[in-house]
Image: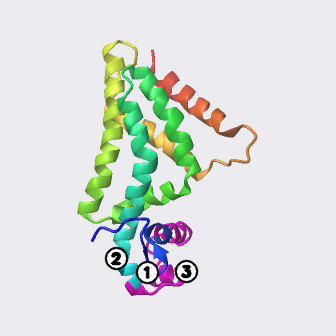
Amino acid sequence: MAVNNNSRYKGISKDEILEVAMKLFHAKGYHGTSTAEICQCLGISKPTLYWYFKNKEEILFSAHESLMESLLIPIIKGMEGIDDHLERLKYFINEYVPVICANPKLRILVHESMFLDPEHSGVITDNWRKMLKCLRESLQGLELQGRTKPLNPSFIAMSLIGMCTWPYYWFDYSRPEGMSVLVENIAEMFFQGILK
């Protein structure tokens, strides 16, 4: 049964359940969090939780889907709208790094996606593949223009995603240098490494 995020059942909404579940997943991990704990934090019964979600895995998938739609799909669409290969890569770095660092929930999703059912993981994987395809096509385009070193576009695209994702583990927003310096440094390292 599809449930509108804004609808309320017994005083609780789907979005509120997702918010509390993600906080618990972040603090204790997906496997370390039970549906009983989610219910206890919200002050609801299990039947109320199961009115919205059939199990804990569906909560994880709904969180993935929601964050993909609000944070990552707009970046993918932005990339798809840029024809210039170099500008597309710059756009990815400038948009993706701040989003991934500013949203600790994404950290959970990157690591816990392996616990999704195949049907659900396929939906999430398709979006990551679109992002990878955009990056790979830009790298191939730059290579055809003779602007890059002879590198494997698939490996370099995956490495770029990894380079831009890893800072969410260690970036400290209280640092005086700030996010803009992090983005500039990643772009400098990446382009110095691939461009002739």
Residue that numbered label 3 is attached to: 41
Looking at marks 2 and 3 on the same chain, the residue that comes earlier in the sequence is marked by: 3
Q: Position of residue 74 (x, y in %)?
A: 42, 41
Residue density around tag 2, few if under 14, some if 14–19, many if 20 or more, within 10 Å: few
**For this rendering, which residue is in front, 2 or 163?**
2
Q: Is residue 91 visible?
A: yes
What residue appears at the point 36 percent right and 80 percent down from the top-left corner? 50
Residue that numbered label 2 is attached to: 55
Residue density around tag 3, few if under 14, some if 14–19, many if 20 or more, within 10 Å: few
Is residue 28 covered in magenta? yes
* Tag 3 secondary structure: helix
From this viewpoint, which residue is outermost toward the right? Answer: 176
Looking at marks 3 and 1 on the same chain, the residue that comes earlier in the sequence is marked by: 1
Q: Position of residue 142 (x, y in %)?
A: 36, 18
From this viewpoint, which residue is outermost toward the top? Answer: 146
Q: Nearer the viewer, mark 3 or mark 1?
A: 3
* Tag 2 secondary structure: loop
Q: Position of residue 128 (x, y in %)?
A: 34, 45
Q: Is residue 23 above or below residue 142?
A: below
Q: Magenta part of the protein: which range?
A: 18-47
Residues at marks 2 and 3, CA–CA distance in whole angstroms: 17 Å
Residue type highlighted by circle 2: Asn
* Tag 1 secondary structure: helix
Residue type highlighted by circle 1: Thr
Q: Residues at badges 2 and 1 in contact (C-beta under 8 Å)?
A: yes
Quarter of the N terminus within the rendering:
bottom left
Residues at marks 2 and 1, CA–CA distance in whole angstroms: 8 Å
Report the number of discs: 3
What residue appears at the point 44 percent right and 49 percent down from the top-left corner? 70
Residue that numbered label 1 is attached to: 35
Residue type highlighted by circle 3: Cys
What residue appears at the point 50 percent right and 24 percent down from the top-left corner? 191
